[in-house]
Image: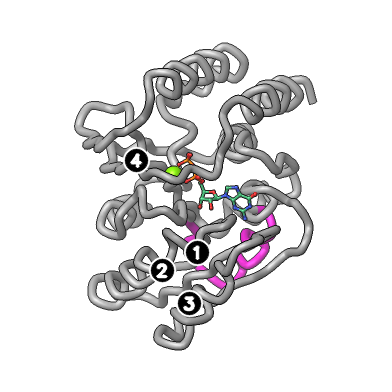
Amino acid sequence: MLLLIPAYNEEQRIEPVLHDYAQHFREHYPGRFQLVVVLNGCVDNTEGVVRRVEAQFAEVSHLTFPGRIGKGGALIEGLKLAPAADLIGYVDADGATAPAAFLELVDRSHLADCVIGSRWLPGAVLHIEQSVHRRFFSRAFHALVELLFRMHIRDTQCGAKVMRRAAVEKIHVGLTIADMAFDINLLYSLKRAGFTILEVPTEWTDRIGSKVNLSTASLAWFLSVVRLRLV
Ligand SMILES: Nc1nc2c(ncn2[C@@H]2O[C@H](COP(=O)(O)OP(=O)(O)O)[C@@H](O)[C@H]2O)c(=O)[nH]1
Ligand SMILES: [Mg+2]
């Protein structure tokens, strides 16, 4: 299992998350576990923090890219490591998805080519601090995505997903979107290639310190999904 964590200026949030994941997988995951943090453009000491954890856990490593490649760009780079693993997943650096919740997705990976956490299915447990503004934006984005892509996925944007190697290898060339619409790009590519996607209700904890600026990001997301639908 290869777990990717994209990280941008996460020196305040990432350290306990890396610890918890490394520790939890040591104790509860029988297979080989590799955690790779994918950094780019950080102007804080995220890399130093990650190195500190690497000194304690051999299964943790990182990649750093100098350009402004975004969360999607970081994941596109990270997914190039797919040939080294049977399953490849990703989660956010802020610990919104706890290791046990991610492992529940992994445990279902025999059921589909891609298993994704869903905050909007019955059974999901949400510890939400989201503003009304943010929640409204999230549902509007969902409606737009459903209108354009007809994937019938309740929650495309949950930060926790896991895929089989064969699926990642097949669709990787079609991944071009670097911003937060990356998830749509990924899911749509999987569907079009005939891979199965299973949504599983998950536990999610909203964290303060979001690295996404909604007002500047929303237009970019909108344009990305429309462009993706056209091309
Ligand atoms: N590598 C990289 N990671 C990013 C970038 N922007 C956001 N991320 C990461 O994407 C994840 C989700 O970001 P977060 O701020 O938690 O988003 P939110 O909780 O949805 O507001 C976190 O792990 C961030 O560090 C970026 O430009 N590059
Ligand atoms: Mg977050």
User: Which numbered disc covers residue 60?
Assistant: 3
Dot 3 falls on a residue whose secondary structure is: strand
Sequence-first disc among 4 and 1: 1
Residue drawn 70% across the image and 58% down it: 41
Residue drawn 41% across the image and 53% down it: 94
Residue nearer the viewer, 49 or 127: 49
Residue nearer the viewer, 225 or 169: 225
Callout 1 amino acid: Glu
Asked if labels 3 and 4 touch by Cβ distance under 8 angstroms, the answer is no
How many C-alpha atoms fall within 10 Å of the one at disc 1: few (<14), some, or many (≥20)? some
Comparing labels 4 and 3, the label whose residue is closer to the camera: 4
Determine whether the beta carbon of the residue marked 4 sits less than 8 angstroms from the nearest atom of ligand 1: yes
Comparing labels 2 and 3, the label whose residue is closer to the camera: 2
Asked if labels 1 and 4 touch by Cβ distance under 8 angstroms, the answer is no
Q: Is residue 219 above or below residue 175?
A: above
Q: Is residue 82 magenta?
A: yes
Callout 4 amino acid: Asp
| Residue for badge 4 | 206
| Residue for badge 2 | 15
Q: Relative to 190, is 99 on the left or the right?
A: left
> What is the spatial separation of the Cα atoms under label 4 and label 1, in whole angstroms?
17 Å
Q: Which residues are magenta?
A: 76-89
Considering the whole magenta stretch, tell me its main secondary structure. Answer: helix
